[in-house]
Amino acid sequence: MSSKYWLFKSEPEVFSIHDLKRAPKKTTQWEGVRNYQARNFLRDEIKKGDQVLFYHSRKDPMAVVGTAIVTKDGYPDPFQFEPNSKYYDPKSSSENPRWYLVEIKLDQIFSKPVTLKEIKGNAALKDMVLVQKGSRLSIQPVRSKEWNAIVQAGHL
């Protein structure tokens, strides 16, 4: 079975690709996702071996800054059960968890970030979910041709 491609957004002030590089074994849980469509991707579709574009959002310039690899399939986000966590959800239970996460490992940091402006200006990427009007999901599917174009641009 071939891997799928995804884009994960993160605010670099909260968690950057450099934080991932400094993490033990360059691996982290992608916790705190609290959108049902993104949760469904984490729970049902994103699998070990899938590849991730790591996107810095809410920063000038916003850009894809590198790649990661999913190292563990989706499982219930443990922070939803911890009352002292900012991700706590009192309506969630271990019998019926609402929120899921995956684990990712750093693959590479691009020598040149691929900015949102560059992505929008690339005709080959005009159908990418990231550039669609109203698309704000923190986790998005990416087509293989989009993946290839962005990874190539990150090494120019």
Image (spheres, rainbow, N blue to C red):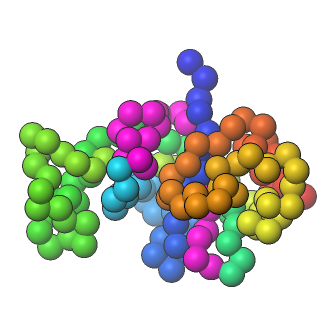
Q: Is residue 127 left or right of residue 94?
A: right
In which quadrant of the rendered view does residue 86 lie?
bottom left
In the rendered image, the residue lying farthest to the front is 133
Q: Is residue 63 above or below residue 98?
A: below
Q: Residue at x 65, y 59 (%)?
A: 133
Q: Is residue 18 visible?
A: no
Q: Position of residue 46 (x, y in %)?
A: 47, 37
In which quadrant of the rendered view does residue 112 lie?
bottom right
Q: Position of residue 128 (x, y in %)?
A: 70, 48
Asked if residue 90 lies in the magenta stretch, the reply is no
Quarter occupied by the C terminus:
bottom right
Quarter occupied by the N terminus:
top right
Q: Position of residue 115 (x, y in %)?
A: 76, 67
Q: Residue at x 69, y 37 (%)?
A: 143
Q: Residue at x 59, y 29 (%)?
A: 3
Nearest the eye: 110 or 59: 59
**Highlighted magenta segment, given as a residue range:** 37-59
Q: Is residue 91 left or right of residue 37?
A: left
